[in-house]
Image (cartoon, rainbow, N blue to C red):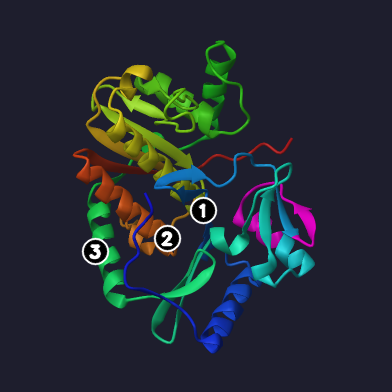
Amino acid sequence: MKTPIPRLEVVKDEKIKKELNNRLVCDITQRNYEVFSLSYFTDRGGELEKIFKEQDLVLQYYKPYYLSEYTIPNIFSIINEHKLYYLDGLKLKERNGVNSIKLLHVLDYSVEYEGTMFCLLEGKWASLNQSFLKYIENQIEHVNSFTLINEDYNLTNDKVEIGRGIIADSEEYDDVEYEEYPFNVYLAEEKNLKLLDRITVKGEFPNIEFADLYFPESQSLMHVKIGSTSNLRACIAQSENSLIAFSQNPKIKESIEIGDVKEISMLFVVSTKNMFVDNSIDFNKSKSLNFKIELVNWYKSVINQNYIPKVIVSKNFYTKNEN
């Protein structure tokens, strides 16, 4: 579902647009990564679909610049190295594909200018009414109220290695490089949960991963995501996609072999400390306006479908072995 953003006005004043573009470029050159995030999903006909089917991408400006990862630091390092500051001319595309999308269409960035909050919306500058921003702030307080910090879900090298050991001892698991899957395998084994990571349903919803874990006791479906704000936004989109699919076809639970579902939950495994306040979480501390809007939209969708919303936040202590 497309996130509704009322009271929004596209900026037409060229002087204001020039100043906003200058501030955007300034934050890129100064590598202020924390004020940016990327979209992983886009709205197509009322459904959220992945923008890119593959992660082998290039940044295109007359010639391709190959991306090792679809991340803010990687994209900005190329922009700064080659001084590609005409941002409206930059496109992202799959290395072996033909489809492309403008970088500004997937870039989440907001900035205050002369007392007004401006943000990028589908590649264009727009201003937001203060009453709407206050509404989002108040709704985030509701989300904060059911968000828990749980150190049992902290990500460590030991947990990842235990998960990889479980994977190596059985043919029922997938052999993948990234940390999230063995971490989920570890959690499923340790807490006696149903592993759903990398499981999709053929036919009606072939591209939707309905959850990473199912909790039989609390009847909770959980999506798990490790990383930056961009990754957390992807987690929200995945959870909402799952919610839409379940509302359209409740019998999906039989296909993925789970029981009843009462709770829709997400686990955010983060390295950032800015949202931790006195042993609690305040998502209003996030600098991503889109993250907060999407989180509110998810919360509303969950309660409107008569499920219980829950968010767990834990810390990422995992360090990659470079050898």
Q: Residue 222: horizontal and vertical position, in percent?
A: 36, 34
Q: Earlier in the sequence, mark 2 or mark 3?
A: 3
> Label 2 near label 1: C-beta < 8 Å?
yes
Q: Give the residue type at disc 2.
A: Asn
Residue labelled with disc 2: 290
Q: Give the residue type at disc 1.
A: Ser
The residue at 30%/55% (across/down) is: 296
Mark carried by residue 295: none
Q: Residue furthest top?
A: 170
The residue at 44%/23% (across/down) is: 201
Q: Nearer the viewer, residue 14 or 37?
A: 14
Q: Residues within 10 Å of mark 2 (few under 14, many from 20)?
A: many
Q: Residue 215: horizontal and vertical position, in percent?
A: 30, 25
Q: Residues within 10 Å of mark 3 (few under 14, many from 20)?
A: some
Mark carried by residue 138: 3
Residue labelled with disc 1: 39
Q: Residue furthest left?
A: 306
Q: Residue 211: horizontal and vertical position, in percent?
A: 40, 31
User: In which image quadrant can residue 154 be found?
Assistant: top left
